[in-house]
Image (spheres, rainbow, N blue to C red):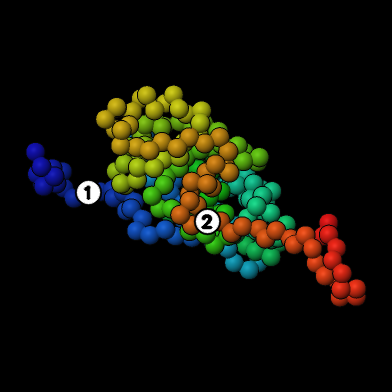
Amino acid sequence: MTPKVVQEFLGIPKFIGEAEQETDEIGVATGLAWTPVGGEILFIEATIMNGKGQLTLTGHLGDVMKESAHAALSYARSRADLFKLKPDFYKDLDIHIHVPSGAIPKDGPSAGITMAASLISALTQTPIDKDVAMTGEITLRGRVLPIGGVKEKCLAALRAKITNIILPDRNRKDIEDIPKDIRKRINFIFVKHMDDVLKVIFKKHKLPTPKKPSSKVKTKAQGRKYARP
């Protein structure tokens, strides 16, 4: 039995999975999804443009995924200083988050950290490492909560030739369901907080570092030094 023979009996493939990403891109994060017929990789895209603070979500998303997107934005706003963004950066921007394959309904909380990753990448103009896939729910405080379908999602990542997989720390027990020979090929990265996720996905392309204010500055009037509060 060969792939060629299978196609002769069953015909051409009716469903084609996502192709692996060729380069590290700004605003594109690789997520993992569960379906009734197995796991799939899911590219979540975010882009920003001048606007009035509007958040647009497309891709046939359910209510839970929409809530995850809003939670991701709130997390990014709460960490604006870390990302070298103005506190009110969102007021002059429109943000668009899109999940391709819009004809397929999508829902569930496990894309939370992926949405946050793509959003922060777009806001900071920092590429995400294409060799990392992730899954996990996010809270407003940035905590990463456990999800389901770990086995199927990890197998989907391997099919896409991705071996670095970010999982919630509380999903450690679930990797026992994955065959041992498969586990050896995967680099599991367990995280508790979104800050841990950012350290992994931006390891190759560093996030911009906020400039530390100079502790001593000369005044024009006196020409003497004073400590900046």
Looking at the image, which residue sits at the far right?
Answer: 222
Looking at the image, which residue sits at the far bottom?
Answer: 220
Say which quadrant the N terminus sits in: top left
SS class, disc 2: loop
Residue closest to the eye, 205 or 169: 205
Task: Give residue 13's mark.
Answer: 1
Q: Please, what is the three-letter code of the amino acid marked with disc 1?
A: Pro
Give x and y (percent) for residue 41: 38, 45
Give x and y (percent) for residue 228: 82, 60
Task: Tell whether 129 sits left or right of 6.
Answer: right
Task: Tell whether 3 sits left or right of 159.
Answer: left
SS class, disc 1: loop
Q: Residues within 10 Å of mark 1 (few under 14, many from 20)?
A: few
Q: Please, what is the three-letter code of the amino acid marked with disc 2?
A: Lys
Q: Does residue 212 appear in the picture of this structure?
A: yes
How far apart are the alpha carbons under marks 2 and 1? 40 Å
Looking at the image, is mark 2 or mark 1 nearer the viewer?
2
Say which quadrant the C terminus sits in: bottom right
